Image (cartoon, rainbow, N blue to C red):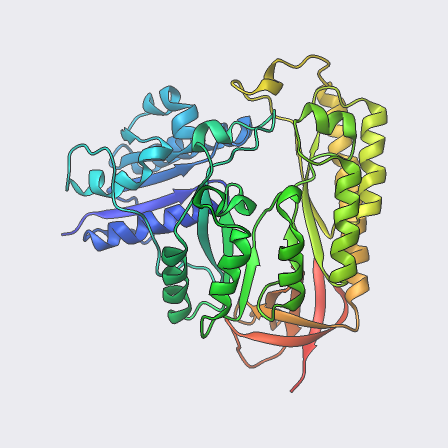
Amino acid sequence: MAKTFSVKTLGCKVNQYESQALREKLLEFGLKESKGEPADICVVNTCSVTQKADKESLEAVRQISRDSAGRSRIFVTGCSAQNNRRALESQEGIACVLENRRKEDLPSIISGAVADVSSGPSLSITRFHQRTRAFLKIQDGCDNGCSYCIIPKLRGPSCSRPLRIITDEAKRLAGHGYREIVLCGICLGDYGRDLGIRDGLVKVIEELEEIDGLSRIRLSSIEASDITQALIDKMARSRKLCRHLHIPFQSGDDKVLALMNRKVLSAGYLQLADRLRRHLPDIGITTDIMAGFPGEDQASFNNTLRFLKEIKPSRMHIFPFSPRRGTSAFGLLDKVKPQIIRQRVAKLKALSKELSLDFCQAQIGRDLNVLIESAPCRKSGFLKGYSGNYLRVYIARIKPIENTVVMAKAGKVFQDGLLADVAE
Protein backbone atom coordinates (compact mmCIF):
# COMPACT_ATOMS: atom_id res chain seq x y z
CA MET A 1 0.00 0.00 0.00
CA ALA A 2 1.27 3.48 -0.94
CA LYS A 3 2.36 5.74 1.86
CA THR A 4 0.07 8.65 2.70
CA PHE A 5 1.03 12.29 3.15
CA SER A 6 -0.43 15.59 4.33
CA VAL A 7 0.74 19.18 3.90
CA LYS A 8 0.25 21.90 6.51
CA THR A 9 0.90 25.47 5.35
CA LEU A 10 1.47 28.61 7.38
CA GLY A 11 2.05 32.11 6.07
CA CYS A 12 2.02 33.94 2.76
CA LYS A 13 0.73 33.24 -0.73
CA VAL A 14 4.22 32.23 -1.85
CA ASN A 15 4.25 29.54 0.83
CA GLN A 16 0.80 28.38 -0.26
CA TYR A 17 1.99 28.15 -3.85
CA GLU A 18 5.08 26.19 -2.83
CA SER A 19 3.01 23.80 -0.72
CA GLN A 20 0.82 23.05 -3.74
CA ALA A 21 3.95 22.42 -5.81
CA LEU A 22 5.27 20.02 -3.14
CA ARG A 23 1.88 18.30 -2.98
CA GLU A 24 1.83 17.72 -6.75
CA LYS A 25 5.38 16.36 -6.73
CA LEU A 26 4.58 13.90 -3.93
CA LEU A 27 1.54 12.67 -5.85
CA GLU A 28 3.74 12.29 -8.93
CA PHE A 29 6.13 10.14 -6.87
CA GLY A 30 3.28 7.75 -6.04
CA LEU A 31 2.30 8.85 -2.53
CA LYS A 32 -1.40 9.24 -1.69
CA GLU A 33 -2.88 12.22 0.10
CA SER A 34 -4.36 11.53 3.51
CA LYS A 35 -8.12 12.07 3.86
CA GLY A 36 -8.26 13.17 7.47
CA GLU A 37 -6.50 10.29 9.19
CA PRO A 38 -2.91 10.72 10.49
CA ALA A 39 -0.58 10.46 7.51
CA ASP A 40 2.61 8.44 7.23
CA ILE A 41 4.42 11.60 6.13
CA CYS A 42 3.52 15.14 7.19
CA VAL A 43 5.03 18.20 5.53
CA VAL A 44 4.87 21.46 7.49
CA ASN A 45 5.67 24.55 5.42
CA THR A 46 6.42 27.18 8.06
CA CYS A 47 6.39 30.97 8.39
CA SER A 48 8.71 33.28 10.33
CA VAL A 49 7.48 36.77 9.46
CA THR A 50 6.81 37.49 13.17
CA GLN A 51 7.59 35.89 16.52
CA LYS A 52 3.97 34.75 16.59
CA ALA A 53 4.45 33.00 13.24
CA ASP A 54 7.49 31.13 14.62
CA LYS A 55 5.44 30.02 17.63
CA GLU A 56 2.53 28.93 15.46
CA SER A 57 4.88 26.94 13.22
CA LEU A 58 6.39 25.17 16.23
CA GLU A 59 2.93 24.46 17.67
CA ALA A 60 1.75 23.04 14.32
CA VAL A 61 4.61 20.52 14.42
CA ARG A 62 3.83 19.60 18.03
CA GLN A 63 0.14 19.16 17.24
CA ILE A 64 0.86 16.81 14.34
CA SER A 65 3.19 14.80 16.57
CA ARG A 66 0.50 14.53 19.28
CA ASP A 67 -2.29 13.64 16.86
CA SER A 68 -0.28 10.90 15.19
CA ALA A 69 1.00 9.48 18.49
CA GLY A 70 4.47 9.38 16.97
CA ARG A 71 3.42 7.37 13.89
CA SER A 72 3.99 10.20 11.38
CA ARG A 73 7.37 11.21 10.01
CA ILE A 74 7.39 15.00 10.01
CA PHE A 75 9.30 16.99 7.38
CA VAL A 76 9.61 20.71 8.09
CA THR A 77 10.54 23.42 5.62
CA GLY A 78 9.90 27.14 5.06
CA CYS A 79 11.17 30.29 6.72
CA SER A 80 10.88 29.11 10.33
CA ALA A 81 12.82 25.98 9.41
CA GLN A 82 15.68 28.32 8.66
CA ASN A 83 15.15 30.81 11.47
CA ASN A 84 14.14 28.44 14.29
CA ARG A 85 15.81 25.23 13.20
CA ARG A 86 17.08 23.95 16.55
CA ALA A 87 13.72 24.24 18.28
CA LEU A 88 12.01 22.41 15.42
CA GLU A 89 14.62 19.64 15.23
CA SER A 90 14.13 18.91 18.94
CA GLN A 91 10.47 17.95 18.47
CA GLU A 92 9.32 14.33 18.54
CA GLY A 93 8.73 12.70 15.16
CA ILE A 94 10.95 15.06 13.15
CA ALA A 95 12.52 13.29 10.18
CA CYS A 96 14.04 16.34 8.50
CA VAL A 97 14.19 20.13 8.82
CA LEU A 98 15.01 21.65 5.45
CA GLU A 99 15.69 25.37 4.93
CA ASN A 100 14.09 27.41 2.15
CA ARG A 101 16.97 27.17 -0.29
CA ARG A 102 16.53 23.37 -0.34
CA LYS A 103 12.75 23.25 -0.34
CA GLU A 104 12.72 21.92 -3.90
CA ASP A 105 14.71 18.87 -2.74
CA LEU A 106 12.06 17.82 -0.23
CA PRO A 107 9.93 15.56 -2.48
CA SER A 108 13.01 13.61 -3.58
CA ILE A 109 14.22 13.23 0.00
CA ILE A 110 10.80 12.04 1.13
CA SER A 111 10.40 9.58 -1.72
CA GLY A 112 13.85 8.17 -1.16
CA ALA A 113 14.78 8.88 -4.75
CA VAL A 114 17.98 10.41 -3.44
CA ALA A 115 19.40 10.33 0.05
CA ASP A 116 20.96 13.77 -0.11
CA VAL A 117 21.04 16.32 -2.90
CA SER A 118 22.21 19.90 -3.27
CA SER A 119 19.57 21.04 -5.73
CA GLY A 120 16.35 19.67 -7.14
CA PRO A 121 13.98 20.17 -10.06
CA SER A 122 12.07 23.43 -10.19
CA LEU A 123 8.69 23.20 -8.49
CA SER A 124 5.58 24.08 -10.48
CA ILE A 125 1.83 23.57 -10.29
CA THR A 126 -1.03 22.51 -12.56
CA ARG A 127 -3.90 23.03 -10.07
CA PHE A 128 -4.57 24.71 -6.74
CA HIS A 129 -5.96 22.34 -4.12
CA GLN A 130 -9.41 23.31 -2.79
CA ARG A 131 -9.28 26.85 -4.20
CA THR A 132 -11.13 28.63 -6.98
CA ARG A 133 -8.34 31.18 -7.48
CA ALA A 134 -4.85 29.91 -8.25
CA PHE A 135 -1.72 31.57 -6.84
CA LEU A 136 1.21 31.74 -9.26
CA LYS A 137 4.66 32.55 -7.90
CA ILE A 138 6.71 34.67 -10.30
CA GLN A 139 9.48 35.91 -8.00
CA ASP A 140 11.24 35.10 -4.71
CA GLY A 141 13.48 37.00 -2.30
CA CYS A 142 13.80 40.70 -1.52
CA ASP A 143 16.48 43.42 -1.70
CA ASN A 144 14.60 46.21 0.10
CA GLY A 145 16.20 45.92 3.53
CA CYS A 146 13.32 47.14 5.72
CA SER A 147 14.74 47.36 9.24
CA TYR A 148 12.04 45.18 10.86
CA CYS A 149 11.93 42.36 8.31
CA ILE A 150 13.75 39.02 8.68
CA ILE A 151 12.46 37.53 5.40
CA PRO A 152 15.30 38.74 3.09
CA LYS A 153 17.75 36.82 5.31
CA LEU A 154 15.60 33.70 5.05
CA ARG A 155 14.63 33.94 1.38
CA GLY A 156 17.72 35.60 -0.08
CA PRO A 157 18.03 38.28 -2.79
CA SER A 158 15.35 38.96 -5.37
CA CYS A 159 15.16 36.25 -8.03
CA SER A 160 12.70 36.15 -10.94
CA ARG A 161 11.32 33.06 -12.65
CA PRO A 162 11.71 32.96 -16.44
CA LEU A 163 8.75 34.48 -18.27
CA ARG A 164 8.25 31.41 -20.45
CA ILE A 165 7.89 29.14 -17.42
CA ILE A 166 5.38 31.52 -15.84
CA THR A 167 3.32 31.69 -19.03
CA ASP A 168 3.33 27.91 -19.52
CA GLU A 169 2.22 27.41 -15.94
CA ALA A 170 -0.59 29.94 -16.31
CA LYS A 171 -1.79 28.17 -19.47
CA ARG A 172 -1.95 24.87 -17.60
CA LEU A 173 -3.94 26.47 -14.78
CA ALA A 174 -6.37 28.09 -17.22
CA GLY A 175 -6.67 24.77 -19.04
CA HIS A 176 -7.79 23.18 -15.78
CA GLY A 177 -10.55 25.72 -15.38
CA TYR A 178 -9.03 28.44 -13.19
CA ARG A 179 -10.63 31.75 -14.14
CA GLU A 180 -8.46 33.93 -11.89
CA ILE A 181 -4.72 33.77 -11.26
CA VAL A 182 -3.10 35.75 -8.44
CA LEU A 183 0.49 36.70 -9.20
CA CYS A 184 2.60 36.52 -6.05
CA GLY A 185 6.18 36.97 -4.89
CA ILE A 186 8.13 38.07 -1.84
CA CYS A 187 8.69 41.41 -3.61
CA LEU A 188 6.32 41.14 -6.57
CA GLY A 189 7.11 44.50 -8.16
CA ASP A 190 10.79 43.60 -8.38
CA TYR A 191 10.03 41.03 -11.07
CA GLY A 192 12.45 41.12 -14.00
CA ARG A 193 15.14 43.45 -12.61
CA ASP A 194 17.61 40.59 -12.13
CA LEU A 195 16.81 39.40 -15.67
CA GLY A 196 17.32 42.84 -17.20
CA ILE A 197 13.63 43.16 -18.10
CA ARG A 198 12.21 46.69 -17.89
CA ASP A 199 8.61 46.89 -16.55
CA GLY A 200 8.83 43.16 -15.99
CA LEU A 201 5.56 42.86 -14.12
CA VAL A 202 3.70 44.60 -16.95
CA LYS A 203 5.24 42.14 -19.41
CA VAL A 204 4.04 39.18 -17.31
CA ILE A 205 0.54 40.64 -17.30
CA GLU A 206 0.61 41.18 -21.07
CA GLU A 207 1.60 37.53 -21.64
CA LEU A 208 -1.15 36.24 -19.37
CA GLU A 209 -3.80 38.49 -20.94
CA GLU A 210 -3.45 36.45 -24.14
CA ILE A 211 -4.38 33.15 -22.46
CA ASP A 212 -7.77 31.78 -23.49
CA GLY A 213 -10.07 30.91 -20.61
CA LEU A 214 -8.29 33.17 -18.12
CA SER A 215 -10.76 35.88 -17.09
CA ARG A 216 -8.94 37.73 -14.31
CA ILE A 217 -5.39 38.48 -13.23
CA ARG A 218 -4.83 39.79 -9.72
CA LEU A 219 -1.69 41.15 -8.09
CA SER A 220 -0.76 40.27 -4.52
CA SER A 221 1.13 42.68 -2.24
CA ILE A 222 3.27 45.25 -4.06
CA GLU A 223 5.49 48.05 -2.74
CA ALA A 224 4.56 51.66 -3.56
CA SER A 225 7.96 52.25 -5.15
CA ASP A 226 7.22 49.48 -7.68
CA ILE A 227 3.89 50.89 -8.87
CA THR A 228 5.05 52.58 -12.07
CA GLN A 229 3.02 54.67 -14.47
CA ALA A 230 3.32 51.81 -16.94
CA LEU A 231 1.60 49.50 -14.44
CA ILE A 232 -1.14 52.06 -13.72
CA ASP A 233 -1.74 52.54 -17.46
CA LYS A 234 -1.91 48.78 -17.96
CA MET A 235 -4.45 48.45 -15.13
CA ALA A 236 -6.57 51.23 -16.67
CA ARG A 237 -6.56 49.60 -20.13
CA SER A 238 -6.72 45.92 -19.24
CA ARG A 239 -9.96 43.94 -19.39
CA LYS A 240 -8.48 41.18 -17.22
CA LEU A 241 -6.28 42.87 -14.61
CA CYS A 242 -8.22 43.39 -11.36
CA ARG A 243 -8.45 46.96 -10.11
CA HIS A 244 -7.07 46.22 -6.69
CA LEU A 245 -3.65 46.83 -5.15
CA HIS A 246 -2.42 45.74 -1.74
CA ILE A 247 0.22 48.33 -0.83
CA PRO A 248 1.96 47.82 2.55
CA PHE A 249 2.25 51.38 3.92
CA GLN A 250 3.22 50.14 7.44
CA SER A 251 2.96 53.67 8.89
CA GLY A 252 1.82 57.17 7.99
CA ASP A 253 4.50 58.97 10.00
CA ASP A 254 7.74 60.00 8.30
CA LYS A 255 9.92 59.57 11.40
CA VAL A 256 8.73 55.99 11.82
CA LEU A 257 8.98 55.25 8.09
CA ALA A 258 12.61 56.45 8.14
CA LEU A 259 13.37 54.20 11.13
CA MET A 260 11.77 51.34 9.21
CA ASN A 261 14.08 52.12 6.25
CA ARG A 262 11.08 52.37 3.93
CA LYS A 263 11.69 53.69 0.41
CA VAL A 264 8.62 55.95 0.28
CA LEU A 265 7.44 58.49 2.87
CA SER A 266 3.87 59.61 3.61
CA ALA A 267 3.68 62.34 0.95
CA GLY A 268 4.74 59.82 -1.68
CA TYR A 269 2.05 57.40 -0.55
CA LEU A 270 -0.62 60.13 -0.69
CA GLN A 271 0.50 61.23 -4.16
CA LEU A 272 0.39 57.62 -5.37
CA ALA A 273 -3.12 57.05 -3.99
CA ASP A 274 -4.30 60.26 -5.67
CA ARG A 275 -2.74 59.23 -8.98
CA LEU A 276 -4.28 55.74 -8.78
CA ARG A 277 -7.76 57.10 -8.14
CA ARG A 278 -7.49 59.67 -10.94
CA HIS A 279 -6.78 56.86 -13.41
CA LEU A 280 -8.88 54.17 -11.68
CA PRO A 281 -11.79 55.71 -9.73
CA ASP A 282 -13.13 52.34 -8.58
CA ILE A 283 -9.80 50.87 -7.43
CA GLY A 284 -9.64 49.04 -4.11
CA ILE A 285 -6.51 49.90 -2.10
CA THR A 286 -5.75 47.59 0.83
CA THR A 287 -2.75 47.77 3.13
CA ASP A 288 -0.64 46.52 6.06
CA ILE A 289 -0.19 48.78 9.07
CA MET A 290 2.21 48.12 11.94
CA ALA A 291 1.50 49.41 15.45
CA GLY A 292 4.14 50.08 18.11
CA PHE A 293 7.33 50.29 16.08
CA PRO A 294 10.15 51.58 18.34
CA GLY A 295 10.06 55.38 18.32
CA GLU A 296 6.34 55.57 17.48
CA ASP A 297 5.22 58.17 20.03
CA GLN A 298 1.68 59.50 20.33
CA ALA A 299 2.28 62.22 17.75
CA SER A 300 3.56 59.61 15.28
CA PHE A 301 0.52 57.43 15.85
CA ASN A 302 -1.81 60.40 15.38
CA ASN A 303 -0.05 61.13 12.08
CA THR A 304 -0.76 57.56 10.98
CA LEU A 305 -4.46 57.90 11.86
CA ARG A 306 -4.70 61.15 9.86
CA PHE A 307 -2.81 59.57 6.97
CA LEU A 308 -5.17 56.59 6.82
CA LYS A 309 -8.23 58.86 6.86
CA GLU A 310 -6.79 60.55 3.76
CA ILE A 311 -5.74 57.35 1.99
CA LYS A 312 -9.05 55.58 2.83
CA PRO A 313 -7.93 51.96 2.34
CA SER A 314 -10.82 49.54 1.81
CA ARG A 315 -9.21 46.95 4.09
CA MET A 316 -6.29 46.92 6.53
CA HIS A 317 -4.17 44.13 7.97
CA ILE A 318 -3.11 45.50 11.36
CA PHE A 319 -0.40 43.87 13.44
CA PRO A 320 1.88 44.79 16.36
CA PHE A 321 5.60 45.27 15.89
CA SER A 322 7.47 42.01 16.32
CA PRO A 323 11.19 42.32 17.23
CA ARG A 324 13.20 39.92 15.07
CA ARG A 325 16.73 39.03 16.13
CA GLY A 326 19.05 39.62 13.19
CA THR A 327 17.27 42.75 11.94
CA SER A 328 18.50 46.31 12.51
CA ALA A 329 15.24 47.23 14.27
CA PHE A 330 15.92 44.61 16.95
CA GLY A 331 18.36 46.90 18.75
CA LEU A 332 16.33 50.08 18.52
CA LEU A 333 15.62 51.84 21.80
CA ASP A 334 12.46 53.78 22.71
CA LYS A 335 10.29 50.67 22.79
CA VAL A 336 6.52 51.11 22.98
CA LYS A 337 4.80 49.52 25.98
CA PRO A 338 2.69 46.42 25.15
CA GLN A 339 -0.44 47.96 26.68
CA ILE A 340 -0.10 51.03 24.44
CA ILE A 341 0.46 48.81 21.40
CA ARG A 342 -2.77 46.91 22.17
CA GLN A 343 -4.67 50.19 22.48
CA ARG A 344 -3.30 51.38 19.13
CA VAL A 345 -4.18 48.12 17.42
CA ALA A 346 -7.75 48.47 18.72
CA LYS A 347 -8.02 52.05 17.41
CA LEU A 348 -6.66 51.01 14.03
CA LYS A 349 -9.13 48.13 13.80
CA ALA A 350 -12.02 50.48 14.59
CA LEU A 351 -10.85 52.87 11.89
CA SER A 352 -10.42 50.00 9.44
CA LYS A 353 -14.01 48.91 10.00
CA GLU A 354 -15.25 52.46 9.41
CA LEU A 355 -13.25 52.92 6.20
CA SER A 356 -14.28 49.49 4.87
CA LEU A 357 -17.94 50.41 5.38
CA ASP A 358 -17.40 53.71 3.55
CA PHE A 359 -15.87 51.90 0.57
CA CYS A 360 -18.71 49.36 0.44
CA GLN A 361 -21.32 52.11 0.52
CA ALA A 362 -19.57 53.89 -2.34
CA GLN A 363 -20.08 50.78 -4.52
CA ILE A 364 -23.87 50.62 -4.10
CA GLY A 365 -25.58 50.88 -7.47
CA ARG A 366 -22.40 49.99 -9.37
CA ASP A 367 -21.87 46.97 -11.61
CA LEU A 368 -19.19 44.69 -10.16
CA ASN A 369 -17.15 42.01 -11.87
CA VAL A 370 -17.42 39.04 -9.47
CA LEU A 371 -15.77 35.63 -9.45
CA ILE A 372 -18.18 33.20 -7.75
CA GLU A 373 -16.05 31.09 -5.43
CA SER A 374 -18.57 28.91 -3.61
CA ALA A 375 -21.72 26.90 -4.22
CA PRO A 376 -24.91 28.35 -2.69
CA CYS A 377 -24.89 28.32 1.10
CA ARG A 378 -27.46 25.74 2.29
CA LYS A 379 -28.74 28.06 5.00
CA SER A 380 -28.99 31.38 3.16
CA GLY A 381 -28.89 30.33 -0.49
CA PHE A 382 -26.30 33.00 -1.23
CA LEU A 383 -23.36 32.52 -3.54
CA LYS A 384 -20.12 34.18 -2.43
CA GLY A 385 -17.26 35.67 -4.36
CA TYR A 386 -14.93 38.65 -4.73
CA SER A 387 -15.25 41.67 -6.97
CA GLY A 388 -12.36 42.86 -9.10
CA ASN A 389 -11.67 45.61 -6.54
CA TYR A 390 -11.59 42.97 -3.79
CA LEU A 391 -14.90 43.23 -1.98
CA ARG A 392 -16.71 40.17 -0.72
CA VAL A 393 -19.98 39.92 -2.63
CA TYR A 394 -23.06 37.86 -1.76
CA ILE A 395 -25.43 37.01 -4.60
CA ALA A 396 -28.97 35.74 -4.11
CA ARG A 397 -29.42 33.16 -6.83
CA ILE A 398 -30.60 29.55 -6.85
CA LYS A 399 -28.80 28.32 -9.95
CA PRO A 400 -25.24 27.20 -9.05
CA ILE A 401 -22.65 29.20 -10.98
CA GLU A 402 -19.52 28.38 -8.99
CA ASN A 403 -16.19 29.31 -10.65
CA THR A 404 -17.90 31.73 -13.02
CA VAL A 405 -17.22 35.44 -13.53
CA VAL A 406 -20.45 37.44 -13.57
CA MET A 407 -21.54 41.07 -13.59
CA ALA A 408 -23.61 41.93 -10.54
CA LYS A 409 -25.16 45.20 -9.36
CA ALA A 410 -24.40 46.06 -5.74
CA GLY A 411 -27.64 46.61 -3.83
CA LYS A 412 -26.71 47.15 -0.19
CA VAL A 413 -24.07 46.58 2.46
CA PHE A 414 -24.43 43.04 3.80
CA GLN A 415 -22.41 41.26 6.53
CA ASP A 416 -18.73 41.84 5.65
CA GLY A 417 -19.35 42.97 2.09
CA LEU A 418 -22.16 43.66 -0.39
CA LEU A 419 -25.39 42.00 -1.44
CA ALA A 420 -25.75 42.10 -5.22
CA ASP A 421 -28.01 40.82 -7.99
CA VAL A 422 -27.05 39.21 -11.26
CA ALA A 423 -29.09 40.28 -14.27
CA GLU A 424 -31.00 37.34 -15.73
**Frontmost residue, 244 versus 360:** 244
Residue in view at x 50 percent, y 54 percent: 183
Q: Position of residue 33 (x, y in %)?
A: 28, 53
Residue in view at x 79 percent, y 55 percent: 357
**Frontmost residue, 381 versus 167:** 167
Say if 163 sits above or below 250 in the image.
Answer: below
Say if 326 sits above or below 276 in the image.
Answer: above
Query: Which corner quadrant of the image does residue 96 belong to?
Result: top left
Say if 416 sits above or below 349 in the image.
Answer: below
Q: Position of residue 416 (x, y in %)?
A: 70, 57
Q: Position of residue 279 (x, y in %)?
A: 75, 61
**Frontmost residue, 36 versus 229:** 229
**Total numbered circles:** 0
Residue in view at x 62 percent, y 78 percent: 397
Say if 171 sits above or below 231 in the image.
Answer: below
Q: Position of residue 49 (x, y in %)?
A: 53, 32
Residue in view at x 77 percent, y 35 percent: 252
Query: Quick one: which residue is furthest to the bottom in this view?
Result: 424
Tell whether 82 sits left or right of 152. left
Residue 292, visible in the rendered structure: no
Tell whether 362 sits left or right of 101. right
Residue 330, visible in the rendered structure: yes
Where the C terminus falls, by quadrant?
Answer: bottom right
